[in-house]
Amino acid sequence: MTRLPTAINLHKASKTLTLTYGPAEVYHLPAEFLRVHSPSAEVQGHGKPILQFGKLGVGLSKIEPAGQYALKLTFDDGHDSGLFTWDYLYQLSVRQEQLWADYLDELQKAGKTRDPALSVVKLML
């Protein structure tokens, strides 16, 4: 059964999307988290996900419904492809902590950083 939020709030200052499913079920999803987990082909890579990096500070500039089944999120780095279905948004919400930890681990393994102004150099001594 699809879980539909009872409220959706975009907080531009804190760069957070808040999804409310009930009085005791409120999730705060940072724009950076949503951006690196976008369901778009650009990110998901047709079955082989492409690690997104340098997205620290990215924000959401617009949210809009896509029919009755999803949200279209527009990020201030220009990314606007990929529809976040209600089911996918709920999975991101309830699995946020583990998904974020996995993402940070993948960044470290790849020698990448969240900060777009930095690049990591590995010295082979």
Image (cartoon, helix red, strand yellow):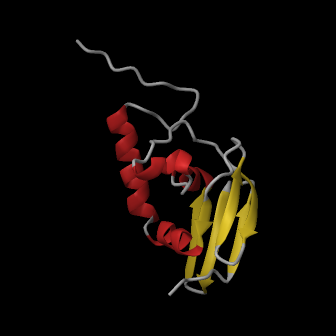
Residue 112 picture quarter? top left
Relative to 8, residue 125 above or below: above
Residue closest to the far top: 125
Q: Is residue 89 left or right of residue 69?
A: left
In this image, 74 relative to 1: left or right? right
Location of residue 5 in the rendering, given as x and y in whole percent from the top left corner: 63, 80
Residue 8 vertical position relative to residue 33 in the rendered view, above or below: below
In percent of the image, x 73 and y 64: which residue is there?
A: 10
Q: Nearer the viewer, residue 113 or 69?
A: 69
Residue located at (57% from left, 56% from top): 34
Question: Which residue lies at the image location 36% right of the left edge and 37% below the top edge?
Answer: 108
In the rendered image, residue 86, in percent from the top left (x then y), is placed at 58, 74
Rendered-image quadrant of the C terminus:
top left
Image-quadrant location for residue 25: bottom right
Residue drawn at the location 61% of the way across and 82% of the way down: 4
Percent position of residue 65, x then y: 73, 70
Q: Would residue 31 appear left or right of 113 to someone viewing this image?
A: right
Report the number of numbered marks: 0
Q: Identify whether 101 is placed above or below 111.
A: below
Q: Nearer the viewer, residue 57 or 74?
A: 74
